[in-house]
Image: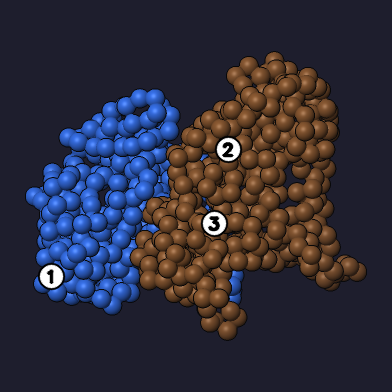
Amino acid sequence: MKVIKIEKSQWSQGLDNLRDAFRLFGPVIEKGFYDYRELAAGQAPDLSFQNTRLSPKSLVFPQSETMLNYSLDPADPERNIMKEAPKDYAPRAVIGLRPCDAKAMVLVKMNFDTEEYQDPYWLNLYNATTFVGLACDAPCGTCFCTSAGCGPYHEEGLDVLLTDRDDHYLAKALTDKGAQLLEKAGWTQAADADTIIEKAKQAAEAKVTSKIETDGLRAADTMALYNAGFWDDVAFACINCGTCTFSCPTCWCFDIQDEAYRTKGVRMRNWDSCMFPIFTVHTTGHNPRDTKTQRVRQRFMHKLKYFVDKYDQGIMCVGCGRCVRQCPVNIDIRKVSALMNALSVQARCAV
Amino acid sequence: MSTYTDKIRETAQRLLKECKVEMVIGFRKGSQPMMNEPCVVRSPEEVDQLIWDSNCGINLANYLTNRKEKIGIVAKGCDSRNIVTHIVENKIAREQLVIIGVPCLGMIDKRKIAAAADGEILSVTEADGQVMVKTAQATQTFAKSDVLQGNCSVCTHRNPVIHDEMIAEPVPEQTDVDPYADVAEIDAMTPEQRHAFFEELLAPCIRCYACRNACPLCYCPTCFVDESKPQWVGKGQDPADVRTFHFLRAYHCAGRCTDCGACQRACPVGINMRLLTKKLNKDCLELYGWEAGLSTETRPALDDYQPNDPENFIH
């Protein structure tokens, strides 16, 4: 696809041109931390960030989302009828998504868009969004994207990939959606910059020195990993909070709740976490994952083994490092994966 | 601090060798600057993973709840006070414990360092009351006293209040600090200002419950936010539900909180929810002369009646 040169002097004008057609979202700094927010008129995304504190998954998968509305009013003829909650699925664009977070959207899509079931809430928002990525020239020390099937210039899940070249951006259109966005913005100056981008990509990849070891996981025996002796030690420090799962761009679990007050009610879904004991409690009171070790094992086994077994598309992790940075007790997925991987070498499938 | 580490390892090794304990709970070096990981050591050969420095802010009493083993536990001042509270509340028996007391000079606040550091932090080391922070751009030095966790900077119980072993001589307690200056600021606000203040304080909450789960006091089999019959509080991000969680959690800690700072430290979005618990600590001190976790012999403020208890708040 073609590469467009955007002079930074044309940047904000281009963004303004987009506002007629798109709601714009991007990273902004609040109290010292970056997060994705809807950009107000005239507001440009702050692209001087390494990565945001929370992932952008909430842009298509809000932490709390109303699905249905209903009336409980005895006088209402439509009482007790669940109705689709009004939603704004007008085109939107995220400006300045990191490649790891874009790849995460692709992994999450495997869950929300299957042959059997297409999640309308997630898909409607996803399809309404154009993803404009920003290549990562200064990865964090905790990033391990290059060994997690991703990278600082990874293109999967993006419609446009921006590369910051000091006084200009190079914008590589990756999809028709992306090309249309560039055109609407009025950024049309073609550039012959493939070599420049390739060199910058190699330089950025070389900066990602942290790795995750996963090469043995695919062939490993699932039950040997499940029954491994290290889980108690891995899980000891865990306090079973939801920080890792809530900050993770690839965690997709949710819980459905009804909330009614007087004559009105909503059916909503909220992020849930496999770290919480009530995640698995049955109505009988029985909890099949009653201990913290079982829950910690579930999280790592899902990301590093079950997902691999089910989809054969690599691990369910893009190496953004958020869980590593934010875990209050420093449980580190790289260390856990190394333990699993080392065991994998001894625990190949017998078949 | 390395002498602390050596002494902790020696003590742990001796206790395990002599079969005084089945396990020792302490810290091992983390994979991140300014992070250590709570860990358990079960044999004398494993004690070399134990360490001590100014990044041991997680409260280890949290790992004692309902355990059945005979346990050695590394405890700084606040951990020891929560161990006392655990004993008083029957979450662990005194006879099960060998408490390895650590006189504490405070834990460093990784957020303060991150905010003051010029660029991404590569490593943090400490010596002689100084904290050296290495980034790709520079090496910066801070006085440790300037980068302490908020609770540590006003702590008046640095020495363990209960211990079976001590790994060093007690450190001087701070006497010239006002632990409740921040509470007084909020007390001085008008109700409208206070409402706005709490609204802003809690706005970033993502309800991960790291504050609750890092807290040794929060050991209910099912927390009220997780109850479904009846459901006390909504599960979404409605600010009223978020506030309900925080305010009720704070009230459940009334007369029990030691201001160990584990909640604030654990919060991924940096909320200082200690402001809520500290108000209740202040009330308990002013009304009942009570500070939590100082003695296994006295009953907690809200678990006890004295004829001279103040009652002027009853209308």
List x then y, in percent, for residue B275: 41, 47
10 Å crowding of disc 1: few (<14), some (14-19), many (20+)? some
* Distance Cα–Cα, label 2 vs label 1: 50 Å
Query: Can residue A202 be seen by looking at this rendering?
Result: yes
Q: Residue at x 50, y 56 (%)?
A: A214
Q: Residue at x 33, y 31 (%)?
A: B134
Nearest to the observer: residue A286 or residue A226 = A226
Q: Nearer the viewer, mark 3 or mark 2?
A: 2
- What is the quadrant of residue A280 in the picture? bottom right
- Numbered-mark total: 3
Q: Chain of mark 2?
A: A
* Distance Cα–Cα, label 3 vs label 2: 22 Å
List x then y, in percent, for residue B26: 25, 59
Tell me the colour chain B is drawn in.
blue
Q: Is residue B299 above or below residue B310?
A: below
SS assignment at label 2: loop
Task: Spot the residue most to the front.
Answer: A351
10 Å crowding of disc 3: few (<14), some (14-19), many (20+)? many
List x then y, in percent, for residue B216: 35, 62
Q: Amino acid at mark 1?
A: Lys
* Distance Cα–Cα, label 3 vs label 1: 40 Å
Q: Amino acid at mark 3?
A: Thr
SS assignment at label 3: helix
Pointer 2 residue: A152
List x then y, in percent, for residue B261: 35, 50
- Give the colouring mode of the picture: by chain
Residue A245: give its label: 3
Tell me the colour chain A is drawn in.
brown
